[in-house]
Every structure is written in structure tokens, then in C-alpha cells.
Image (cartoon, rainbow, N blue to C red):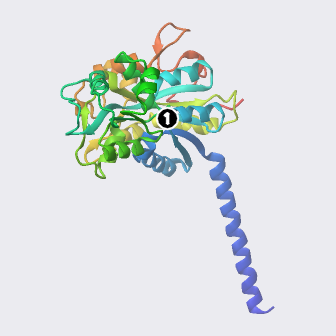
Amino acid sequence: MNPWKITAIILALALVATLGVSVCHLMESEEEGVLIATTTSLHNTGLLREIAGDYKEGTRVQLKFFPAGTGRALEMARKGGVDMVLVHSPIQEKGFLENDILMMRKIFAYNFFVIVGPSNGPVDMMDKNATEALMAIHNSGDNDPLWVSRGDNSGTHSKEKYLWEKAEYNYTQLYDACKDKWYVNASSGMQETLNYAYEKNCYTLTDTGTYYSWKSSGGEGFEILVKASEELLNVYSAMIVNPGKHGINLEGALKFLRYLISDDCQDTIGDYEKNEEKLFYPVAELLEDGQNGSLIGVAKVGFENEQIYNWITKYAYFKDEATGKITECPTQNRWPDISYRSEETISQK
């Protein structure tokens, strides 16, 4: 046979073999992949990229994230478009647990909301808490843009509405009366909202993770004016879509949930920084050990472990109707005999 033909046949066989391996690899990756709807703060800060890289290296499992506001992320779960969610709005999460849309809730991190704005802005924020600051903005009498809201049903938007109500304003009435004056609805993600507020010399509510990440690229003169406090606590939870309602990668989702609260991942969360500022704080050990837990970097925000523990259980725990106690995940939303820490697997029914 012509040697050129022999060479061509060998090359063709090698190509087929290579393609076969590639197709098998893609099929394996697709089968093992986990689809996760996530709040933008975890994604845009780069934390999830760090976690996903470590996770893939150890498991060869591909994590695919869909960044959105918490409201949109929860709706993706309702429709069965993802396997699990990473969100930060206990008020919204509660309804999805009560309706059995989500299961196995686990709190894995926290940071704080803060009010940021121009250091030389028109409203005096000195020594004010969050509700006092909002009242000062409302009473400023300014008809030019002054406050920028996410306006997207995200966890940040949910917290903002809570703070307006706590300041004794009806949010719907306030929005209707002021939306064409000093109140601006950005209907955007957090980084875009920060950019708009910075450009227009306005104030806004953000989480510290996104702010420090955004600030690392600029934002001169745009500072934290109302600092971390109990009412500004921001808690991040992971939940799995109920497999009884949608066909999901249950094993993959459960394994990743367990990884989120593992020592390795909690260390990654605690070590993640921008310009020597911690963006998020791990919390699994503290919640497991109660008030005697150890929390990396807690002194950075000036609060004791006991304070953080009490605030989280007050703000982000729910009453378990089966036991009468408060818990991060009610009994009805857990699978019996399945531990968050266990390597035990369960089959999808």
C-alpha cells in the first residue's frame, strides 16, 4: 500500500480516537456538572471562581453558575432550571422553603450591608445608623438624584425595603412619590448600581464584598458612610431544588453543598481578600459549635463571636413547626438521616 495512504489512515484513526475521548469527556462533564443560580455578589467578586477552581481540581466536577439577583435566582429554582441556589434574602427564602420548592438549606457565609456615597455629599451621615441615614436622605428636600436602588427584587433590594419600613416609611408609597425626584431605580446588578451612584454622586446600599471588590479598581472619594451593624447583617445560604418537583442532579448538588461547609471551602472564603479587605466571612463552624465557635476574621468588623451568632440566629433562622425551635432549615425541608457533613449519598426518586 502507498505509504502516504497508510499515514493518512493512521492520522484518521488517531483523529477518531481523539474525538471519541473528547466526546466522552464532554458527556462526563455534562453528566457530573451542577447548575447553580447565584446572587451577583458571590459571583462578581470572584469568590465563586476561586471555589469552583478548587472544587474541580479535587472532584473533576464542573460547576456552572448563573449570576442573578436573589429574586431571579429563586425563580429559576421554582422553574427547575437549576440544581441549587446560593442566595442572601432570608425573607424570600422562607417562602420557598414553606412551599417545598427548596430543600436542605445551609448558611455558609456572611458579610454586611453598608451605605456608601460621596465623602463630601449633600447629606450629613456622621454617626448615623442605617435608618437614620435614610431618614436624612428622605428629609433633605433635594429633587435631584440622591439615592440609587437596585430595584430588582434582589437580596440587597429586599434589605433596602426592610430598612425603609424600619425607618417608618411605606416603601410603595415612598417609591411612587419620589421615583421621579431623588429616588433612582437602577434595575441593575450591584456593580452597575455602584457605578451609577458614583457617577451621579448619589448614595446606595451595597454589601461589603461587592464594595471592596469594586473599590479595588477605583471609586476615589466614594466611601462607606454607614458601617456594619446588626440591622445590616447579610447572610448567604445554599439550598437544593426539591427533586420531587424537578429532575435535578441531586447527588452533585448535595456533594457541593457539603463542600461549601467543609473546612477547605470555609478557609477559602475566609482567606479571600481584595486590597487586604475580607469580602466574606465563613460561618459553618460557628453555627455548629454555637457561641463557642471560632470565626475567621471576626475582629476585622469589630464584633464578638457571640454577637454574630445571635444576630444570625435572630435574622436568618426560622421556626421549625415540628420541634418548636429555630433552625436554619426546618425539618420538613430536610431528608431524614442525611447529614450535611456525611459522605453518604442518596438516590433521586
Asked if residue 339 can be seen in this view, the reply is: no
Closer-to-camera residue (140/107): 140
Q: Residue at x 25, y 31 (%)?
A: 301
Q: Which residue is mark 1?
A: 152
Judge left or right: residue 153 versus residue 2: left
Task: Say whether residue 191 is left or right of residue 256.
Answer: left
Q: Position of residue 291 (x, y in %)?
A: 32, 19
For image coordinates 44% across by 30% down, the residue present is: 157
Q: Residue at x 68, y 54 (%)?
A: 27
Please tell me how many numbered marks the rendered image carries: 1
Q: Residue at x 36, y 46 (%)?
A: 195
Q: Position of residue 92 (x, y in %)?
A: 51, 24
Q: Is residue 126 above or below residue 279?
A: above
Q: Which residue is outermost to the right?
A: 1
Q: Toward the viewer: 50 or 118?
A: 118
- Type of the residue with mark 1: Asp
